Image (cartoon, rainbow, N blue to C red):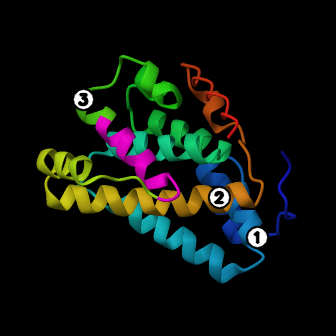
Amino acid sequence: MAPRIPLADLPADLEKNMIEQLGTVPEPVAATFHSPKVSLSSMEFGGKVAEWGDAEESLKSYAHMAVATQVGCGWCLDIGYFHALNQNLDLAKASQVPVWRDSDVFSSLERDVLEYAEAMTNTPPTVTDDMYAGLLDRLGAPAMVELTAYIAFVNMATRNNNANGISSQGFSDNCEVPLAKRPAASAA
């Protein structure tokens, strides 16, 4: 899919920085840079989110990819899997997030986090008291607050990218283990 909005030109220094970090300019940045305040604020907040450290990185990565799968954000799934590679996560496990319900590689905690990420992503959200309490008991309050805020941020980013027509840029092509194909969306 081609972006629904033309990609904006970035200031030379920002473009250079993006290329040094990722090898290319991320399309979500170029798409939103028509409003530099929106683009820069989103990047700034995303940077702050990345600095949080109360929840395990693997749980946040799997949650991010679960949200991306459910929303249908190919770019987020692509970059999420690429980040899993750079975080030295188990790629065989990370590759199974799109089909986690049918996979036996996830621990009970990981499965509950994946289910929670999907429940937060549903419209309307379907988080239950029991679901929340079970994770709170195992993660503790700081990690639960962080995980919840992280999933909410990822929902904003994935939905923004999806609406702007942003698709995969091939970041995950560098990963040795292929990413499992997303299940086809069911007709409602």
For the point 50% across and 52% down, the residue is: 122
Q: Position of residue 24 (x, y in %)?
A: 71, 50
The numbered mark at residue 108 is 3
Q: In the image as oriented, which residue stretches furthest toward the front?
A: 188
- x and y, in percent, of residue 165 in the image: 78, 54
Which is nearer the N-term, disc 3 or disc 1?
Answer: 1
In primary-sequence order, the first of circles 2 and 1 is 1
Location of residue 15 in the rendering, given as x and y in whole percent from the top left corner? 71, 64
Closer to the observer: label 3 or label 2? 3
How far is the residue under mark 3 from the one under mark 1?
Answer: 44 Å
Quadrant of the rendering where the N terminus is positioned: top right
Label at residue 18: 2
Does label 3 or label 2 sit earlier along the sequence?
2
**Which stretch did the figure color magenta?**
112-124
Q: Is residue 74 left or right of residue 115?
A: right
Left or right of residue 69, residue 144 in this image: left
Quarter of the figure with residue 61: top left
Give the left or right position of residue 12, taking residue 138 as reference: right
Residue topped by disc 1: 10
Q: Amino acid at mark 2?
A: Met
User: Badge 2 local density, few (<14 within 10 Å), some, or many (20+)?
Assistant: some
Q: Give the spatial CA distance, label 2 vs label 1.
A: 10 Å
For badge 1, the amino acid type reads Leu
Q: Foreground mark, 3 or 1?
A: 3
Labels 3 & 1 near each other (Cβ < 8 A): no
